[in-house]
Image (cartoon, coloured by chain):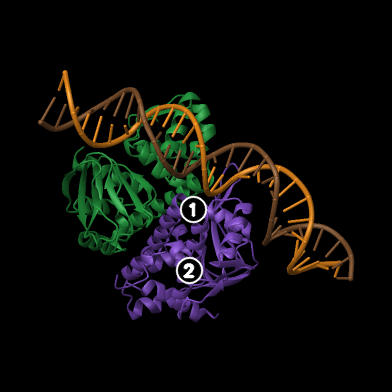
Chain colours: A green, B purple, C brown, D orange
Amino acid sequence: MDRDSVLASLLRRLDTVSKLDPADIAAIRSLPIAVRHWEGARAIVSDGERPSDCCLIIEGFCIRSKTTEAGERQILSIHIPGEIPDLQSLHLQRMDHDLATLVPSTLGFISHASLRTLTHARPNVVDALWRDTLIDAAIFREWIVNVGQRPAPARLVHIALELRRRLRAVRGGMEPATFEFPLTQEQIGEALGITPVHANRIIRQLREDGIVDVSRGQVRVLDETKLAELAQFDDRYLHQDPAA
Amino acid sequence: MDRDSVLASLLRRLDTVSKLDPADIAAIRSLPIAVRHWEGARAIVSDGERPSDCCLIIEGFCIRSKTTEAGERQILSIHIPGEIPDLQSLHLQRMDHDLATLVPSTLGFISHASLRTLTHARPNVVDALWRDTLIDAAIFREWIVNVGQRPAPARLVHIALELRRRLRAVRGGMEPATFEFPLTQEQIGEALGITPVHANRIIRQLREDGIVDVSRGQVRVLDETKLAELAQFDDRYLHQDPAA
DNA sequence: GCCGGTTCCAAACAAAGGTTAAGGATGCGG
DNA sequence: CCGCATCCTTAACCTTTGTTTGGAACCGGC
């Protein structure tokens, strides 16, 4: 995926409601970006650090997580190409969580300095980027509900359906029956707030019940109806619809 | 609490890192604010609505929450005077959760229009308000960790200690051994992702163990050392320190 | 002062999820 | 093709949390 098409998916997301004019778009396109390749399962920025750049995902998958003093890790979000998972570092100097790749990924680094220049010059761009971080927060809120209120099987399928919806927003097209979900069962446990063996139990159960097959880094939907019933997924919180 | 002193606590929070100059402060002070009184346990804005104002808490306590299709409610955050719990509505037109008072409260409504004029005219103010919403998101992240990884007693005391720290930031002074925590046991359950009877169990346990006494809308710390050990509370995620 | 609601408290039992442990598949590097 | 590491899988058992239920305390309104 080349730089232009990635910026395109970023711009598509930013443009949903905020009305960017051609000059805004040109300004974003001319941001200096340092493209680098990252191995899978590697830290990008870690808790406590003070990064000087933000990181645009060009290709691959990333996660954010926090580790408690007791050593338990909680995955906070999953990120896909076209997203800037550490945009918050622009105003929150010190990281309060980790950002890492899940699989080998191509990343584009944009300096805080150039972003700050851009935002101070262009009110529309601030609005669009600010809005993007607010959607990030909306996803966290839903994640709290997921972990706090739903039984474990519903938790898993809810996260999977959210990811599928977000992938579609970036890639276009229909919702595929099979899509990437590059988490190990241990990571699924960390995302849902359960142990890896319980993650295994519910994955097996979902497979036996003919609802979804989660394996080898993929989700394969076996029965859309049963799945929708279990997940109770309503994408309003993603704020993807410009008209809404 | 009069308008000036509330704006003062708002400004103190905003001013932590973002350097507001006198003109910025004057502009914020001259925002038109409609002050209204609200009963306790009343909705301010509800899921699905499209508010045209943001709500500054002048006096009282508010909560944000989401209710699942299954009818389970999850409390997402607790808010105190000086905060604007629905600032996100400035850019996310449609509410994806509820905002309600916990106790009788005095609220100040500021129109989106006047906020947008202000932010478009003053880059420093955008930065400060944007940053404020990013701290909001940081608190959500910690809330996810709390609900996902900590055992129920630690969850409760962690939230209590966070609230105490945030109250201090607004009111100044030392951390008191007794402070307001105006949640019923049912609401504590909704905040922690447990049932009210389990909330009762752990509250009783914490009392018997001589750690904290949570009752009648208050938290009374019985043993700071044991409490600190249990809560593992590290306030870095609140981003209150300008120097950090 | 009484009444109806809410909140708090508590016990017995059920279910979900955690713990420990160990064997099997899979894939990669030599 | 072998060996090692990661991952997935499963089972038995234990702990935490949910469910159901009922009663006591409290509070505001009449």
Between marks 1 and 2, how big is the CA–CA gap? 29 Å
What kind of residue is marked 2?
A: Glu
**In the visual, does B85 lie left or right of B12?**
right
What kind of residue is marked 1?
A: Pro
Is residue B45 visible in this depiction of the protein? Answer: no
The numbered mark at residue B83 is 2
Q: Chain under label 1?
A: B
Residue B32, percent across and down? 49, 73
Residue B214, percent across and down? 59, 66
Q: Chain under label 2?
A: B
| SS label for mark 1 | loop
Whichever of labels 1 and 2 marks the residue nearer the N terminus, that label is 2
Q: Nearer the viewer, residue D22 or B21?
A: D22
Q: In which quarter of the image is the N terminus of chain A?
A: top left
Residue A18, percent across and down? 37, 52
Front label number (1 vs 2) = 1
Q: Residue at x 49, y 39 (%)?
A: A152
Q: Mark 1 points at which residue?
A: B151
Q: To which quarter of the image does residue B35 belong?
A: bottom right
